[in-house]
Amino acid sequence: MKPRVAFFDFTGCEGCQLEVLNFNLEIVDLINVVDIVEFREASSDHSDEYDIAFIEGSITTEKEIERIQGIRNNAKILVSLGACACTAGVNALKNFYTMDENLKLVYGENAKWYKTIPARPVHSVVPVDFFIHGCPPIRGEVIRLVKCLLTGKKFELYHDPVCVECKLNENICVYEKGQTCFGPVTRGGCNSICVNSGRHCWGCRALVDEPNLNAEKELLARYNLTVNDILGKYRIFNGTLEVAKS
Amino acid sequence: MQNRVISKKDLAGFVDDLIKTKAAGEVIGIQAKDSKFNFGPLKNAAELRLDYDIALLPPKKYFFPQIETVLKYEFGATPKVEPVVNDKAMCLIGVHPFDIRGLLLFDAVYGGANPDANLMMKRQKSVIIGVDCLTPNPKAFAASMGTAVTDEGFDLMLTDIGNDYFVTVGTNKGDSLIKKAKTKEATAADQEKRDKVRKDALKKYQVTLKMKPDEIPALLDANWESKVFNDKAATCFSCGSCVMVCPTCVCFDVQDDPALNLKGGERYRRWDACMLSEFAKVASGENFREHKEQRFRHRMYRKGKYLLERYKYLGCVGCGRCAIACLAQIASPAETFNLIKEAK
């Protein structure tokens, strides 16, 4: 029997699901080896029976806490898919304001009709078995996880910093161009896609296992910057991390 | 084999002919990439930038690609395994002597008793047209390493002697290629010009190793506990930049990638290196170079001692790429060796 796979969206832009739909022909191979039983962006089917649950988005309401707990109870394997699920992503920017301020900012005089809580990554609410980082996640990594689950191979997160792939791609270092980049402390696996396209690394795949933050501070100082100068940029994807609070 | 002299105009014609006729395979040349230089397929001789300081990645990428499929397999009643060997002929133009020394190290590592087909087939089929580096990068120290000039490892070596290039012919293959171009026989005066240009270029290197390269192994032997390794490694990102751009880093990782239909798959290899935190992690989970200080020291021993003792080539050719790439500014082997010596 093929494993039953479900995709669920929480607070986020649903771009992660869109990225899965962008698999093109690979999606045909995918549905030959798994049954997709719930996938709101692609199908109106619904099921509570599934083996693998992919969770997109972060937890930002009390209701979502109950919902994710229900999914965790049903699923054998739960996967955090994308930056919002893995680190609370962009949603964590709201955590730097009071919840009242947020509600007023978004809903104005109708704020009283809504409730909200600070944004949290999925694993701070329920246990998560696997993480697929990134905004958006890299398609190949989703496929690689599915292949590992099907073949019983251990799924290992890409552990090297973005700099490795960036060098393999023969990019000119962003720092040499006089800009800052989170590549040296950010988990790679994205094929340095942002730098390849002329931008810098935004840190969407979170920190590597052993980031050398002192070295990062020294590096920033050499470019006449402090942590505070770049904190705003870093909070875009990593607001829940200790390093982003100051 | 007679050395030649070729005018700059005729060299351009020679290169354009190589591109047009593919007489020596696909033509790869050094060219500008924004404010830097890199090797890439050459469309015409005008793109060639023989006056460059350093290429972003060394030319080893053409013999040992960043990622390379090495075999394909199929499951089934009779499983099939097919090696994948890409052995296309290539002509690399504009390789600096220190990068040629890097390729010679690769030959020693991969061409021994159990040769690596993927790498050695490409090496054998390829033509190397070198160029002497007259504008060294400020972080390079090839002059100290004895690698700024080479008398082996090339088919032809070009030296800019003003209006012309001096062409040192290294092999019969190179000889027969250059015979197709419009050249003159090199005179003793031409050769003097070449030697002077080379000698002057050596003086342009700004970083100096304060010892002879063959003294490095003994220095390292006596300084395993040196504080320099810890001091330097303190700001190491373990980002791998130094080892990804190195012309003498020979290591790779191998992975099997099954197809999604689970009917087969392929095995590929990808550059891997000792400065990365998981490089020395083994199946049990044990990591025998868990700390960045250990990794930093290992790299220095590798560059200054291990490779030399095993393969007779120093593991560092003084190109300076690691020092350019290192954001923490700790990667230059020359600087580390000098510090250890001074601390004595």
Image (cartoon, coloured by chain):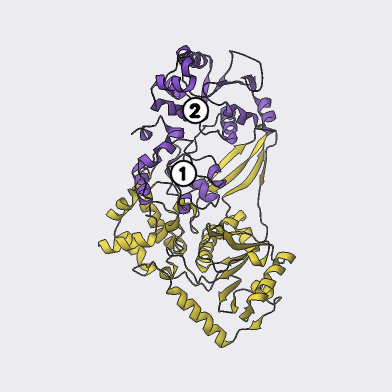
Letter of the chain that mark 2 sits on in the rendering: A
Chain shaded purple: A
Marks 1/2 in contact by CB < 8 Å: the verdict is no
* Residue named by callout 1: A183
Residue B170 is drawn in which quadrant?
A: bottom right
Q: Residue furthest bottom?
A: B188
Note whether A162 is above or below B133 in the view shown.
above
Note whether A235 is above or below A108 in the view shown.
below
Q: Which colour denotes chain B?
A: yellow
**Where's residue B225, x and y in %?**
28, 53
Letter of the chain that mark 1 sits on in the rendering: A
Disc 1, SS = helix
**Where's residue A12, x and y in %?**
53, 25
* Residue named by callout 2: A84
Q: Earlier in the sequence, mark 1 or mark 2?
A: 2
**Where's residue A99, x and y in %?**
41, 20
